[in-house]
Image (cartoon, coloured by chain):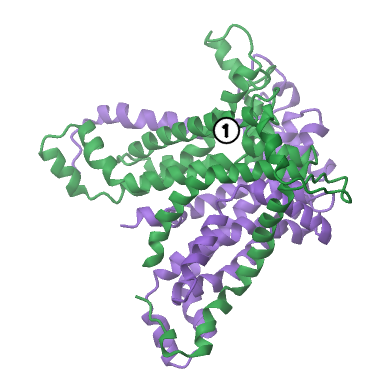
Chain colours: A purple, B green
Amino acid sequence: MIDRRSRLQKFVEVEIPVLLIALFAIGPYVWMMLTSIKTDADIAAFPVRYLPTQVTFEHYRMLLERTTFSGNLLNSFIVALGACTLGLGVSIPAAYGFSRFRFPGRRVLMTQFLVINMFPIVLIIIPLFVLMRQMGLLDTVLGIVLGHSTFAIPFSIWMLTSYMNAIPGELDEAARIDGASRLQTLRLVILPVVLPGIVTTGIYIFVTSWNEYLFAMMLSGQNVRTVTVALQLFIGEFTVQWGLLTAGGTLIAIPVTILFLLVQKRLVGGLTAGAVKS
Amino acid sequence: MTPTRTAGGNAREAVTPYLFLLPALLVTLAVVLVPVAQTMWMSLHDYVLFRPKNVPFIGLGNFARLLKDEVFWISLANSAWWIGLVVSLQFALGLVTALLLNQSFWWRGLARGLIIIPWALPSVIIGLTWTWMYDFNVGVLNDVLLRFGIVEKPVAWLAQPGTAFYSIVLALIWQGFPFFAVTILAGLQTIPDELLEAAEIDGATRFQRLRSVILPSIAGVIGTALLLRTIWVANSLDVILVMTGGGPGFATHTLPLYAFLKAYSGMEFGYGSALALVLTLLLLAVVFVYVRRQSRELGR
């Protein structure tokens, strides 16, 4: 559309408001990072010293050397990777089933996966704790991964089904005529085409699992504590040392911010597929 | 569109789709459906975790207790106010952001990236950063407000019943508005230019174009986003848990948080389950509307 507004008018009406909103969006994030590189003296000063008088990485060094944080980072990484593997592993065949077959119960089953994604976490987490306690799965990687699969599986199935629906059925037909079995068709024909969708879904599961707090707290103990739980515990342990806490926050946030920015464009399409698709 | 092969009555072909679904169904059964059934069972019993041998069946006793529980009613009222306030403000800011980002200017791509950042962050960090900014002694918010003379002395934002609730609401608006901005922007980009040009030629002002062309065109997107967000906000409790733990007093108790605290700190799993079920039942209407919209997709 032709924009008849002058440059100045546009600057005032569009760019300045956007700038303000962007500042609101990144302000707290930047503030966290700034705090993490300030000395304790700067952090405790009031009126607030906005810029560090001296840049220090002391908090990062202390966090990684004197606390369990590096171990917690590793735990989070393993759990998130596990959630991806389990989530994608069972969802890829399920999405193929939903996308390529019409069978009795399809609608009910698919709706079921949508509905359980809407269940309040408290509805699941309370009994899951009791069940895992009975089965000896508390404080194990598998336990937390299973907890995270409660949201990873339904989400992946819906995302992947919509990605697979976009692939024309003639592609499978051709492979079937050439004598490929269903599994071979999925592996050799569908998977390569839908790979970008699988990567997007996998990254989203990774980010959600890495960020997750309630399941990780309820189902973990000393052995497999994840970063989010560890950081929250530090608040009690270190009588609120903001330098240390913001350093931890920065270390947790940077990898997921990057991953999220990579996939968000394709994600939005899937999340609102029903409405945006026209 | 997709060829159906079951027509031939081939028995092996008929079970194939179920085999593909089996792993997902088994895991879901174990981690979602069995637990939900367990919640229903627990809600009918006086189940306290440290008393595993003695779990008497009390019928609807937990639900009767809940009706007389003052904290339940406080949490329910807080939840309603919380959902209404958070969702509507997230939506308002998200809509404005989307409309602005739909204009062309040279750093639009950058702005879009920056605005999404809060969405990516874990709730623990959202709680932590905002708690830090709200800090009574050295918090940046008090500092700014003092400098501009808006307050005369530092405010203990999270420690006063009057301000704690709204302080968390602001943090949640920050977390959630990017979701609305991005989804609505995606919707805006599907509106054909010709439609807007036609309206302009007909002499529509910018506000008229917004009201009569733009908003109706993206009503579907807005509806879906509002429903999804309502469900998420209604269920979420982690940011509140990190920032105030529900306090001071019961000022920031919401229904899911109360259910969680009853089970986690109080070890009263039976009563906690009853609270969780009530929350689920209350939400069911919203979920139902959302599912009906989405399952229109299934027929295709």
Give percent across and percent down for residue A147. 69, 56
- Res B122 seen here: no
In the displayed structure, would residue A137 be above or below residue A102?
A: above
Q: Chain of mark 1?
A: B
Give percent across and percent down for residue B169. 55, 29
A267 on left or right of A206: left
In the displayed structure, would residue B256 be above or below residue B81?
A: below
Considering the numbered disc 1 on the image, is that residue within a helix, a strand or a loop? helix
B4 on left or right of B256: left
Nearest to the observer: residue A40 or residue B145: B145
Residue appearing at x 49%, y 83% in the figure: A185
A191 on left or right of A255: left
Nearest to the observer: residue B58 or residue A36: B58
Considering the image in quadrants, where does the C terminus of chain B appear?
A: bottom left
Q: Given the image, on which type of amino acid does mark 1 rest?
A: Ser
Residue appearing at x 56%, y 11% in the figure: B147
Identify the image quadrant of residue A53. top right
Seen from this angle, which residue lies furthest left?
B202
Seen from this angle, which residue lies furthest front?
B59
